[in-house]
Amino acid sequence: MSDTRNWIESISRSIDAKDAKGFSEFITESGSFRFGNQPEVTGRKAIEDYVAAFFTMIGSSSHEIVNVWDNGEHIIWEGRVNYTRLDGGKVPVNFTNIFYMNGRLIDKYNIYIDNTPLF
């Protein structure tokens, strides 16, 4: 479990550093990504571009791990993200990520979050 936790911390660091390319490298070339109620994005490069665009809409973020479950095929990350909006306002938001794994890469990345307070 500590390996999984370390791996999630690596994903978290890439997001909080606004490193869209680094983030996308956790996902398979043909993987999919869905952020909240937004349409699914498919393909590593498309995901990188999507996430890079999102990063321009926030000042910063800081992710926390509340809990992690790993059954070998799926990893669930329950967490909290503390966003800093572009106007400097701070917004804490709870989320759950479900990763459908293909080896050590994510084949399907679903984020369950309500970002309404962010915007």
Image (spheres, helix red, strand yellow):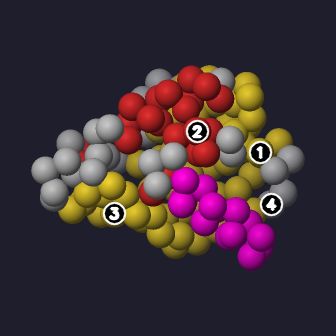
Check if residue 8 falls in the magenta segment: yes
| Residue ID at (84%, 57%) | 72
Relative to 70, is 25 above or below?
above
Label 4 or label 2, whichever comes before in sequence order? 2
Q: Disc 1 residue type?
A: Leu
**Comes first in the chain, label 2 or label 3:** 2
Residue 21 badge? 2
Taking the view exactly as shown, the residue that stands out farthest to the bottom is 2
User: What residue type is disc 3 on?
Assistant: Asn
Instruction: Please report whichever mark, 4 or 1, sits nearer to the chain's N-terminal start.
Output: 4
**Circles 3 and 4: CB distance less than 8 Å?**
no
Name the amino acid, label 2.
Lys
Count of labels shown? 4
- Distance CA(mark 2)–CA(mark 3): 21 Å
Magenta residues?
1-14
Residue topped by disc 1? 105
The residue carrying mark 4 is: 71
Query: Residue 52, percent across and down?
Result: 44, 35
Q: Is residue 72 left or right of residue 68?
A: right
Residue 61 image point, x, y percent: 37, 58
Instruction: Give how far apart the Cα atoms at labels 3 and 4 are.
Output: 28 Å
Image quarter (top left, top right, bottom left or bottom right) of the N terminus: bottom right
3D distance between C-alphas at marks 3 and 1: 25 Å
